[in-house]
Amino acid sequence: MSITPRARRATKTWSKSGQVRRKPSPYEITGSQFHYHFRREPAPFELSPDTPINEWYLKHREGSPLQIEDWETFRDPDKLNYRSYVSLQHQRETVMDGIVDEYERRDHDATLGADWAATLTVAFAPARFAIHALQMAALYLGQVGPSAFITNAAHFQAGDEMRRIQWLAYRCKSLSLAGTPELVSSTLARNTWENDERWQPARKLLEELLIAYDWGEAFAALNLTVKPVLDIVLNEELALVAEANGDGLLASMQREHAHDSERSQRWSKALVATAVAGADGNRDHLQKWVDQWSSAAYDAADGLRSLLADAPVAPQPALLGRSDIVGRHEAFLASCELGR
Amino acid sequence: MPKLNRSEWYDLTRDMNWTFRYVEEEQVFPEALSNGRGIPAEEWWRWDEPYKISYREYVHNQSEKDESAYSINAAIGRSNHFENLDAGWKSGIVAHYGAIAIPEYLASIGESRMGRFGRAAAWRNMATYGTLDEMRHGQIQTYFPHTLLDKEARMDWAHKAFHTNEWGAIAARSLFDDMFTANDAVSMALQLTFTFETGFTNLQFLGMAADAMKVGDVDFGALISSIQTDEARHAQQGEPTLRILLANGQKEEAQRLIDHMFWRAWHLFALLTGLSMDYYTPLEHRSHSFKEFMNEFIVKQFMEQFRDFGMDLPWYWEQFLEEMDWYHHALHLGVWFWRPTVWWNPDAGMSVEERDWLEEKYPGWNDTFGKWWDVITENVRSGNVDRTLPETFPMVCNMCHIPVCTPAGHVTGHFASPAPLLVDYEGRRYTFCSEPCKWVFESDPKRFAGHKSLIDRFLGGEVQPPTVEGALRYMGLSPAECGTDADDYAWAFPGGAAGEIRRAV
Ligand SMILES: [Fe+2]
Ligand SMILES: [Fe+2]
Ligand SMILES: [Zn+2]
């Protein structure tokens, strides 16, 4: 016996997702209209409307200058839900396993010099503090995103940052066993992060990023500015320097991480398109935030590049200069139809 | 396989705490999102989780788990498995999805709050896995009911319930927002992970999985047991957080947080799990009574947990133990009577054999609840079903948002008075179902006082027209969606329409 007589018209999807022409994809089914609390009256959450956390969301999410009528129109171009994300990353981690296996079979680390390890001790091991801040900022963006499609993409990005940190830890540990115990000294890494002048622009940038609480600014600062700029150095430039210094393993690892960074840029670009198409002022809001955060991001990148410049062997072609980084960032912004 | 074990490098990913120089610590961890109770940063950095996992292990394991759960679902979707399930069991599943699926997704936001605002890197990493885990739980528990939409239109409520002001949805939203969506990271670690995930989720997920396997609902059973395997990992965020609070003189505060959420979780799960286990699950497939499950998963577990940490049992422990004998029976009677106000079809569960079972599991049931059911049964048998339907609404509690059942507590000998508890606060009167609900309110009135219960809204004119029909519409229930008796009253006619109705003597 069925509980309810079937509806006359067959239901293709959730009643709250509106009319659809065909059966929606798993991505749609598991994301559409999940943020029922966005712009809910009288407050997002079922407590006193003036309880501090309701006010926080009303101010930083509903009250952000970055608004469109319907954020549900945004789609991640990669259409990832949990199932497809873990499946994708299972494949990428299988690739990573294969890269590491291959170098370890050849006893790669024995071929590397102590001076390269010394560079990594200063330029690479402390990067985990920076990437952890990127992870924290992505989790913030996720919890204040106005639709589940935005939230989920940001949460996957946080997972990607954790992935990058863990392989950093793995690389530091494995290389330390070849005779550089300093690589795994947390005291030394923290001291470098907190006191080395070349790390300070990045530290200042990231500490300030953590308190950019308006959701629109959090997005523009993290995904349009800080992360794309720093990832140029942390992934690509580091890979070039590693290669020049005979560390093909590290180079391959960072290039593997670049896939995650590119995915972040794909959904960021799509979100800009949704925002700009959705309301007249949004292009200006985003541009203003990007402008506010850019020069500090370039300063941070300068600091990181000066650390890499101390490597025993300089890469050919040479490391990017500041203007190249600016140019790369501007090209990304132009692909988002932002920038001057 | 990479040559290094996780244990050889993992600590580097935990040693990522530093002192802020360019911004203030209070700006990075504002009280509304991370109430550190004044404990210094370095103390928080001692946070140490007992169980660790790497990202590569995580995605390797989780993709395999998802593939297996989804492939069971796909295989079963092609059969007529669902059509053949017992109607009462299906009601329990429909209730479960509506009350649990979207909250699981909300827990992902709670976890990301701890992932950002937890006060140690090790904690934030564990919460990052939790963020992903709970996204999984929200998505898989909406995807599965979505595959059943063409067989059971009520599955829409897996997604719809939290968009509505249906009273059970308000009760669930109020609980889960208080516990995680609108909670700060530190309180959440105690209230979501320590209090809720180590006990109550076992009750719903392991207990219901046991029943599902007996019922033969492989789809649901495989689903919720797969979900439960994720809980052990992220549920451990509570213990290290509690240890730090205790080491820093915050025992009283920790006790208050736990007592507060334990009671609230108990009330909602009495409603959700209590009814499913003791009334909706077909008798021949009930593995244990709700009370037996409660004793196994909650009472024993918490007594050990409290003892291990030197915590006291909640001050209302005796009342809690007593409520296990009567509270969910009262809720069942009320939910069945007000069945048009819920999104599932309540199963009376009143066959002769079921009543015998209830009397055996809850001695004295016949003399109390049984007598009320006799009246209902007689009305049904004599064709007066309209007398078993509501014309007004009960008061609901301003804390748990569940209808006040104090009269049943009184008649069963547990309360001195049938009257609800009242509190006047800043010019408004609040109604509570129990001393602990009242205590939760009074220990932090600002958090709750501005909120209006469904009945406050009704009496305040927000529900128009102020009739049963108007209220049903306000609750998002179309006439086709209003609950009806799951068995079409067959239970009232044992052995067919001519059968004798058992009378409690
Ligand atoms: Fe969960
Ligand atoms: Fe959980
Ligand atoms: Zn109550």
Image (cartoon, rainbow, N blue to C red):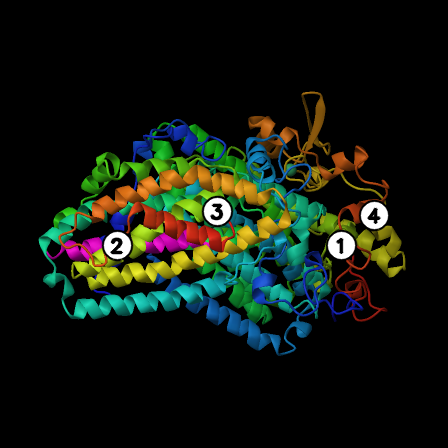
Please, what is the three-letter code of the amino acid marked with disc 2? Leu
Closest to the observer, A233 or B119:
A233
- Give the structural element (helix, strand or loop) at label 1: loop
User: From the Cβ of disc 4, is ligand 3 less than 8 Å away?
Assistant: no
What is the chain identity of the residue bearing mark 3?
Answer: A
Q: Spatial distance from mark 4 to mark 2, Cα to Cα?
A: 71 Å
Q: Position of residue A165 (x, y in %)?
A: 31, 52
Q: Is residue A278 left or right of residue B3?
A: right
Q: Position of residue A131 (x, y in %)?
A: 34, 47
The residue depicted at 54 percent of the width and 51 percent of the height is A272
Q: Spatial distance from mark 3 to mark 2, Cα to Cα?
A: 27 Å
Res B504 label: 1
Q: Position of residue B388 (x, y in %)?
A: 83, 52
Q: Which residue is mark 3?
A: A339
Query: Where on the image, by quarter, is ligand 3?
Result: top right
Q: Is residue B371 magenta?
A: no
Q: Is residue A157 magenta?
A: yes
Q: Residues within 10 Å of mark 3 (few under 14, many from 20)?
A: some
Pointers 3 and 1 within a single chain: no
- In the picture as drawn, the residue positioned furthest to the right comes out as B383
Q: Is residue B427 left or right of residue A259?
A: right
Is residue A55 visible from the viewing direction of this image? yes
The residue depicted at 68 percent of the width and 73 percent of the height is B83
- Give the structural element (helix, strand or loop) at label 3: loop
**Viewer-nearest of labels 4 and 2?**
2
Q: Are marks 2 and 1 in contact (CB under 8 Å)?
A: no
Q: Which residue is mark 2?
A: A238
Which of the marked residues, 4 or 1, is nearer the chain's N terminus? 4
Q: Which residue is mark 4?
A: B390
Q: Spatial distance from mark 4 to mark 3, Cα to Cα?
A: 63 Å
